[in-house]
Image (cartoon, helix red, strand yellow):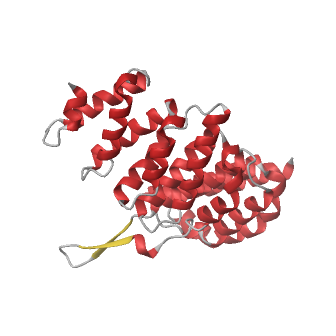
Amino acid sequence: MVMNAIKNPSTKHRYLYLNSIREIIINDSHALESEYNTLCDELLKLSNHQEDRIRTLVAECLGTLFSAYPIDMQTDIQAALMDKDLKKVATVARSFMYSGKKIEGDMVDDAFEDCAADLVKLVASKDRDIKWFSLEGVLAICRTNPRLLAKNMNALLKGAFGELAINPAYIQEIQLPDNTVQKIDNGVPIRRSAYSLINHLVDVGACDKQVVLDLIDFIAANGVKETIDDMFLHIFQVVSQLWKKNSAVAHSKVEPMIAAVDPKFDFWVKNLANESIEKKTVAVFRVVYQMTECAEN
């Protein structure tokens, strides 16, 4: 009944049926083994559905199934990642956020490694969602088995570093009734993912110390200028982790970091009553404390 329902394009309850399938395969990814081929075909057909909530469920279902059947699904998944339909590519890239929970075995490693190479290429996509979900997909693989990214590390780092800066193309301007303009930065998720990915690669020792130095240099020159509170806090959380895990390397960058934040301290201290400024100040002081501890040790 459930399988017939998701195949019927006129059903008004497809979301509920897809959610049922999601719950089944999350609890037992082999529970629908007899329907495996049909299920995969239908999920891929729905990967470009006009409703985002449907595509989100499809991505989770595909990712969970790929964890269970990576070798069987590899050809179809890689073909979908190279498809001309941007929504389909974004959905399948997003599926890797749910597929990296268990990667073991040579053939399984090969399947994920090949797909990871495709995701790395997609980071250069001009489509915002494809770029974002590709970064998140690679991050999910990195968290489980970072060595699968080794062959494409240089391209991955180049792509991730290229997404750290604020991209004017993602700034949306909305005209308000009072004739003022509100700016919305739709590039925040991409920058957050890029920072998280590079930080995790450093954390697991997947890249050399030059990456630490380059990241700190970028943050000192550009990261401190972030106006989005959540991004600013995320960036300084990354800095804190870099100093904690790589103090010997990071210590050479104390002066540039202090020089970058020092001009802001007077303003922050005078405006601590503002909740946003208070959070930023605490984040920066936490990093300064981390630097001091590392210097003393």
Q: Which of the image's four quarters has the N terminus?
A: top left
Which residue is more in the foreground, 212 or 17?
Answer: 17
Q: Residue at x 50, y 32 (%)?
A: 69
- Residue 21 against residue 280 in the figure, above or below: above
Which residue is more in the foreground, 134 or 204?
Answer: 134
Q: Residue at x 22, y 72 (%)?
A: 176
Q: Position of residue 108 (x, y in %)?
A: 60, 35
Q: Position of residue 286 (x, y in %)?
A: 65, 51
Q: Position of residue 172 (x, y in %)?
A: 34, 71
Left/right placement of residue 241 relative to residue 210 reads: left
User: Is residue 163 among what the camera can see?
Assistant: yes
Q: Residue at x 57, y 63 (%)?
A: 269
Q: Residue furthest right?
A: 297
Q: Residue at x 14, y 38 (%)?
A: 11
Q: Position of residue 228 (x, y in %)?
A: 46, 63
Left/right placement of residue 239 relative to residue 98 reads: right
User: Is residue 279 among what the camera can see?
Assistant: no
Left/right placement of residue 197 relative to residue 127 reads: right
